[in-house]
């Protein structure tokens, strides 16, 4: 680390004059010495550990207020700080396949140094694209099959779109994202990036071994800034992940970018904002919430298809952070706690979710009509369910009763055993093609299965 600093051309020395947790103030001799915004600064603790800082604010008196990417334990006032004259860069290149890096681009998988020759800054100026009508109209939507029935039917994944999996604690976001990785990466001929943001440390571990077992490790680059890291690391790790995806994109590849969990990015931003002494907005979040979420999402474009898990605090989907992320997503799968309690995994609530790719021009007329019919039946079922709770099923008219029973079968059929959840339910995962899903759903709707019990449709793949 220190050698790297020594060769930087424009380095300037300053002194640490204040440390407040992950926020560090550095004073420079004169105004000309002041580092740029987002410039990297190195300093050392008294026990000779490197501390890496990013400039976040310029204060009066030639003071740069910085956010630390590493722990500031044992950092003292008067420690010498070196402004490197460069922004934070990470190594990029095919050498990163199968490797795990942290926010600064250092390998954290114990597999030795990464010998990449190229580096790329993680902060980039986001040039907002003008509306590009030609591009949108000219590109035929290319659908990625996921093998998960409810996802293929109601939330078709189009290449280059952003799909969100949102839900409260323990509703199955991580399991669903892992299943998506499991099912599509193997088939996918492009490349993949997984970005772990502020979640459990063990999950990164599990994922690594899962990839290794399935034999897809050589297609994936990983970046982790998990919950044990300072807010600066958890906030910027998303940019590290996106920078890897941008590298792959620049090589002409189709890229899948998985992120778990984007809410933690907002949360880290909020911590930093408070530590920097900014007044929060009325909602309690940082005043820069929407621009931070926006800047990140503006960089996910072109051939990058993104899958984002979003934690919903207190199961409240109107939370300002969730809403800010929401508006950038093409498809939103909302996981419901009620469904997890009934064991209806994946616990996607079709009536609370939405998908702009569900369009006859993209999925075809038959698929579209079946999906609309499913939503109609489920909406009616919700009404009938309340009536049945009061007066019992025998009081329903014949037509309503048929619809009620078919709706329950459809609801059961939308559950599916997952490969990555085999240990939870003891059933082997099932991959169902979209064509099979459509055929089965049509059979149930047409009454061809009216004589079969509802249980037969629970946690299965397709049926004959
Ligand atoms: N598809 C599934 N099949 C069976 N069990 C599941 C499934 N999805 C989730 N579960 C159960 O729910 C638990 C929590 O799932 P998961 O870790 O994915 O939740 P999460 O939404 O990521 O939670 P957190 O917000 O805490 O990260 C799992 O440990 C498992 O027991
Ligand atoms: Mg999770």
Image: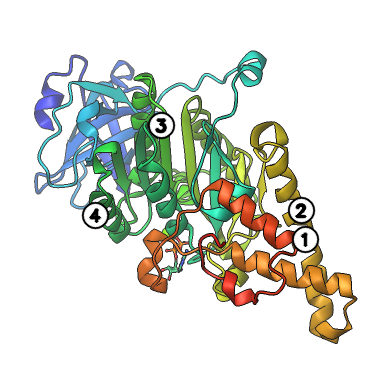
| Res 409 quadrant in image | bottom right
For ligand 2, tell me if the residue under mark 3 lies within 8 Å: no
How far is the residue under mark 2 from the one under mark 1? 6 Å
Q: Which residue is mark 3?
A: 255
Q: How is the rendered protein coloured?
A: rainbow
Q: Earlier in the sequence, mark 3 or mark 4?
A: 4
Q: Give the x, y percent position of residue 262.
A: 47, 47
Front position in the image: 423 or 132 = 423
How far is the residue under mark 3 from the one under mark 2? 33 Å
Residue 154 shown left or right of residue 445 in the figure: left
For residue 289, say whether it is visible.
Answer: yes
Where, quadrant-wise, is the N terminus in this rendering?
A: top left
Q: Give the x, y percent position of residue 263.
A: 49, 50
User: Which element carries disc 3, helix, strand or loop?
Assistant: strand
* 2 and 1 marks in contact (CB < 8 Å): yes
Quadrant of ligand 2: it is bottom left
Q: Earlier in the sequence, mark 1 or mark 4?
A: 4
Q: Which residue is mark 1?
A: 377
Q: Give the x, y percent position of residue 87.
A: 31, 24
User: Which element carries disc 1, helix, strand or loop?
Assistant: helix
For residue 350, say whether it is visible.
Answer: no
For ligand 1, tell me if the residue under mark 1 lies within 8 Å: no
Q: Which residue is mark 4?
A: 209
Q: Is residue 100 above or below residue 166?
A: above
Q: Earlier in the sequence, mark 1 or mark 3?
A: 3
* 3 and 4 marks in contact (CB < 8 Å): no
Query: For residue 373, which numbered disc appears in the image?
Result: 2
Where, quadrant-wise, is the C terminus in this rendering?
A: bottom right
Q: Earlier in the sequence, mark 4 or mark 2?
A: 4
| Res 6 quadrant in image | top left
Front position in the image: 296 or 211 = 211
């Amino acid at each position: 680390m220190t050698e790297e600093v020594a060769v930087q051309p424009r380095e300037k020395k300053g002194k640490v004059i204040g440390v407040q947790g992950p926020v560090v103030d550095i004073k420079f001799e004169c105004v000309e010495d002041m580092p740029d915004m987002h410039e990297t600064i190195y300093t050392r603790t008294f026990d000779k550990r490197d501390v890496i800082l990013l400039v976040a604010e310029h204060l009066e008196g030639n003071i740069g207020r910085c956010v630390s990417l590493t722990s500031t334990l044992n950092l003292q006032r008067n420690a010498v700080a070196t402004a490197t004259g460069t922004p934070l860069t990470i190594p990029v290149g095919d050498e990163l396949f199968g490797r795990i890096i942290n926010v600064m681009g250092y390998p954290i998988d114990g597999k030795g140094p990464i010998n990449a020759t190229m580096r790329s800054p993680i902060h980039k100026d986001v040039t907002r694209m003008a509306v590009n009508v030609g591009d949108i109209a000219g590109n035929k939507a290319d659908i990625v099959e996921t093998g998960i029935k409810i996802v293929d039917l109601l939330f078709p994944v189009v290449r280059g779109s952003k799909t969100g999996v949102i839900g409260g604690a323990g509703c199955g976001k991580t399991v669903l994202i892992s299943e998506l990785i499991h099912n599509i990466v193997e088939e996918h001929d492009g490349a993949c990036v997984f970005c772990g943001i502020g979640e459990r440390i063990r999950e990164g571990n599990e994922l690594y071994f899962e990839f290794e077992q399935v034999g897809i490790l050589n297609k994936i680059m990983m970046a982790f800034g998990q919950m044990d890291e300072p807010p600066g690391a958890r906030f910027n790790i998303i940019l590290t992940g996106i920078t890897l995806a941008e590298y792959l994109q620049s090589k002409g590849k189709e890229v899948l970018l998985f992120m778990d969990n984007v809410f933690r990015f907002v949360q880290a931003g909020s911590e930093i904002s408070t530590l920097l002494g900014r007044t929060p907005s009325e909602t309690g979040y940082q005043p820069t919430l929407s621009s931070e979420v926006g800047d990140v999402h503006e960089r996910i474009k072109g051939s990058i298809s993104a899958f984002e898990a979003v934690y919903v605090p207190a199961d409240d989907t109107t939370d300002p952070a969730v809403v800010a992320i929401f508006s950038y997503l093409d498809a939103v799968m909302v996981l419901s706690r009620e469904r997890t309690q009934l064991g209806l995994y994946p616990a996607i609530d079709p009536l609370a979710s939405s998908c702009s790719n569900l369009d006859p021009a993209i999925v075809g007329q038959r698929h579209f009509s079946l999906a609309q019919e499913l939503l109609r039946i489920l909406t009616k079922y919700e009404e009938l369910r309340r009536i049945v709770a009061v007066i019992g099923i025998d009081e329903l008219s014949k037509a309503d009763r048929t619809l009620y029973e078919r709706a329950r079968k459809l609801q059961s059929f939308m559950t599916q055993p997952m490969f990555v959840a085999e240990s939870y339910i003891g059933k082997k995962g099932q991959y169902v093609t979209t064509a099979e899903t459509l055929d089965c759903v049509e059979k149930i709707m047409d009454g061809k299965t009216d004589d079969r019990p509802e249980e037969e449709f629970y946690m299965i793949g397709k049926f004959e």
